[in-house]
Image (spheres, rainbow, N blue to C red):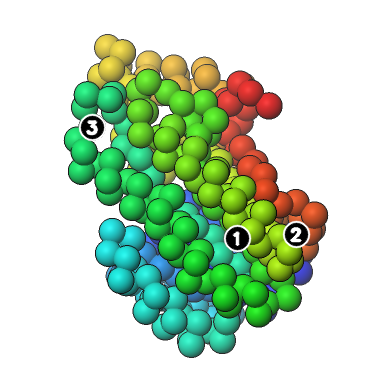
Amino acid sequence: MELGLQGRVAFITGASRGIGAAIAEEFAAEGAHLGLFGRDRAACEALAGRLEAAHGVRAAYAPIDFERPETIGPAVAQVVAALGGVDILVNNAGGAPRGLLHEIPDGDWLSGFLVKPIGLMRMSREVIPHLRRSAAGCIVNIGGTRGREPSTFSTMAGPINMGTLGATKVLANYLGPDGIRVNAVAPGTTDTGRFTELIGLTARERGLSREEAERHLLREVPLGKVVMPVDVAKAVVFLASDAARMITGTAINVDGGRTRSI
């Protein structure tokens, strides 16, 4: 689908693998240039080279670690200098380990919130001056459906993703007068390495075999299928395009119907 993104510059955090890499691939297929940020230099540089060769776009990488906030500003400045600006920011980095309240040490809570939503806001703050110079500035935050429906078994996912949704609305209201749209995409259970981990955890928590645990997880999804990273990526690219020019301050679930609320 031609979404009019050719020549725009998209910054993506957590870009080295999984959903982040799929988002980079989808933007490159639309002809957008890429700013890739993450801690895994080798993976990000390999992805940049592959997408440049496959799609004829430019891609630049800078290391970033949201637990070390002093890395954010220099990384943004480096990639802006390489690509000449930025039109789109995708805050994808971060996640929440599964676990019950008594199983999660304080350090995991602090690390999780430093990446998202605190790191998300710090990254946005660095990029916003550049988005204000764009004619098509927008931000898409990757959250999670547990931000709307918290789970006992995923104690951290509720608060962290609630924070991400709240940050999305705050930024949308703040940046609306500048013509900058801000939305979120909330993936459900997605087929990444974490899905394999989730199957094992569910099996142990419920006393099931791995096969039974996978069937249990998919029974919770009305469409009966696991979300693929490309499904999330397509929603992100749509929200970043002019086709979504009047959509801001909202979140789209990409979860096969698993979230019970509307």
Q: Which quadrant is the N terminus positioned in?
A: bottom right
Where, by quadrant of the figure, is residue 98 drawn?
Answer: top left
Three-letter amino acid code of the residue under disc 1: Ile
Residue 56 visible in this rendered orientation of the protein: yes
Q: Earlier in the sequence, mark 1 or mark 3?
A: 3
Q: Earlier in the sequence, mark 1 or mark 2?
A: 2
**40 relative to 139 in the view: left or right:** left
Marks 2,3: beta carbons within 8 A: no
> Residue at the spot x=63%, y=51% of the render?
183
Of 230 and 182, the residue lying toward us: 182
Instruction: Give the SS element for disc 2.
Output: loop
Write down the residue under mark 1: 139
Please give the label number shown on residue 1.
Answer: 2
Where, by quadrant of the figure, is residue 193 drawn?
Answer: top left
Residue 28 visible in this rendered orientation of the protein: no
Please tell me whether residue 216 is drawn above or below residue 19 in the rendered image: above
Q: Which quadrant is the C terminus positioned in?
A: top right
Q: Earlier in the sequence, mark 2 or mark 3?
A: 2
Q: CA distance from mark 2 to mark 3?
A: 43 Å
- Residue 203: image location, x then y, percent: 30, 19
Categorize mark 1 by other alpha carbons within 10 Å: few (<14), some (14-19), many (20+): many
Instruction: Give the SS element for disc 1.
Output: strand
Three-letter amino acid code of the residue under disc 2: Met
Write down the residue under mark 3: 104
Where, by quadrant of the figure, is residue 44 drawn?
Answer: bottom left
